[in-house]
Structure formats: C-alpha cells, structure tokens
Amino acid sequence: MSLDISVWIPDDNAYARRDVLVNPPGISTGVGAESFRHRLWGSAAARRLGATFLPQLADITVENRGNLQVPHGQLDAFEQECVLLAENVEQLSAATGIDADRILRYLTNARHAVERAKAVRGGIIIW
C-alpha cells in the first residue's frame, strides 16, 4: 500500500461531508509507502523541524482512520510545512535514510495538490 494525496471539496451529501475530486490525468499523487507514516512523516526528525500536519499520519485514531485531512483554511500552513521540510531535506534524509530526491518528489506532489485545492476552495486528504 502507499499513501496518496487527493483534493476534496465540502459537500453535505457526500460521505464524511466531503467529495473527493478525480485527479487530472498525469498527476502524481504519491506521498510515500505506507511505512512512511512513521519512518518519514511521523519521524522524530520531521517533528524536530517543526512539522505538525504530516506527523499526524503516524497518529492513527478511530476518528481519523489514519487519514490526514487539511481543510481549506489551513492549506497555507500545510504548504509552509512542506516548504520547511523541503528546505531541510538533507537533514530529514540523513535522519530517516530516505533519499532526499524521493522526499522532494513527495513534497512537490503535496504542494501541487494544495494548488488544486485552493483553486476549488477545497482541502486535501492524505490516505
């Protein structure tokens, strides 16, 4: 299994009050292997750098089902977290043993999803 990022828009008629949009053709939505919940995004290194959104992927609860939902109003803060991790990718790579270019690809996918979400006044979900 792998972690993917999608764009959602609020919809009172959809499951969990959201309607997940179909991704445009050719869009990469991967943000890592399932193990990256803990190994990368929930790592002590990511937390030390100040990440607060992505580490939630490691905190599986009944309520979140292991998913991370970021509503429209928090997209700027989520994007800033992605920038912060990208700026410190070498440190994150050294601490986790994950190739820096791979981490950057996942962060780029996340930032592209944020752009798409902003365009439709929606949010993102990583699942």
Image: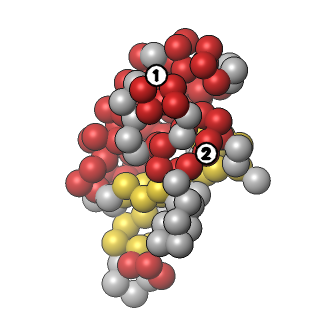
Residue 121 pos. (x, y %): 28, 59
Residue 49 pos. (x, y %): 40, 24
Q: Earlier in the sequence, mark 1 or mark 2?
A: 2
Q: Which numbered circle lies on residue 37?
A: 2
* 27 displayed left or right of 17: right
Residue 117 pos. (x, y %): 37, 53
Indicate the secondary structure of the residue bearing disc 1. helix
Indicate the secondary structure of the residue bearing disc 2. helix
Mark yes or no: residue 74 visible: yes
Quarter occupied by the C terminus = bottom right
- Give me the residue at 43% from left, 37% from top: 111
Question: Would you place residue 40 above or below residue 20 in this image?
Answer: above
The one nearer the camera, 48 or 21, is: 48
Select label 1 or label 2 by which is in front: 2
Residue density around tag 2, few if under 14, some if 14–19, many if 20 or more, within 10 Å? many
Q: Which residue is mark 1?
A: 86
- Give me the residue at 52% from left, 31% from top: 44
Question: Would you place residue 80 above or below residue 73 in this image?
Answer: above
- Give me the residue at 61% from left, 51% from top: 4
Mark yes or no: residue 83 visible: no
Residue density around tag 1, few if under 14, some if 14–19, many if 20 or more, within 10 Å? many
- Give me the residue at 45% from left, 16% from top: 88
